[in-house]
Amino acid sequence: MDIGANIRKLRKEAGLTQSELAQALKIPHRQLSRYELNISIPSVKNLIKLSDYFEVSTDQLIFGHGKEFVKKTKINDLELMDILRRVDRMKRPHREKIKWAFRSLIDGESIPFRSEEPKIAKSA
């Protein structure tokens, strides 16, 4: 998905017209339309406005993130944030092991680790 499609998706999910979003962001309607059509790219200033308005990261706004956008989370510990970003880039089996380890440490108990992929029921 491209940035224009991401902006349009977020706007529609919020139930807004282009005019309403442009007014909220204090940018011209035509400019927002050009963003959604990928005729122009938002400036850094406008990327931040869009990111703040929809409560998603600028990375998610630009690149998308799977089927759903993840809401911004404020983490003050920069080292922890860096670790989480690195974990997020790992392959799924490795991420699952690290999430399991986090849950075990946070909950203070040993949780059995399941290494197999979840079974998905086949529809008839």
Image (cartoon, grey):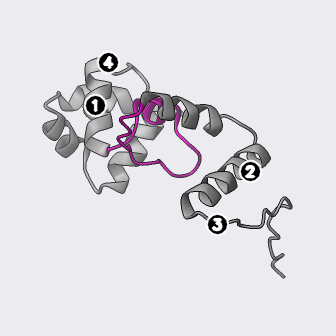
Mark 2: amino acid: Lys
Residue 121 position, x and y percent, is: 81, 76
Kindly identify the residue that appears in the image at 22 percent across and 42 percent down.
21
Kindly identify the residue that appears in the image at 25 percent across and 41 percent down.
53
Q: Which mark is residue 44?
A: 4
Looking at the rendered image, the quarter that the C terminus falls into is bottom right
Query: Dot 2: what SS?
Result: helix
Residue 20 position, x and y percent, is: 18, 45
Q: Is residue 45 above or below residue 61?
A: above
- What are the residue bounds of the magenta stretch? 55-77
For discs 4 and 3, the disc positioned in front in the rendered view: 3
- Disc 4 to disc 2, C-alpha distance: 36 Å
Mark 1: amino acid: Leu
Q: Residues within 10 Å of mark 4 (few under 14, many from 20)?
A: few
In this view, the residue in front, 54 or 111, is 111
Residues tagged 4 and 1 counted as in contact (Cβ below 8 A): no
Q: Earlier in the sequence, mark 4 or mark 3?
A: 4
- Disc 1 to disc 3, C-alpha distance: 50 Å
Q: Is residue 75 magenta?
A: yes
Q: Earlier in the sequence, mark 1 or mark 3?
A: 1
The residue beneath circle 2 is 97
Q: Earlier in the sequence, mark 4 or mark 1?
A: 1
In this view, the residue in front, 20 or 48, is 48
Mark 4: amino acid: Val
- Disc 4 to disc 3, C-alpha distance: 45 Å
Query: Dot 3: what SS?
Result: loop
The residue beneath circle 3 is 109
The residue beneath circle 1 is 32
Q: Main secondary structure of the magenta part?
A: loop
Residues tagged 4 and 2 counted as in contact (Cβ below 8 A): no
- Disc 4 to disc 1, C-alpha distance: 14 Å
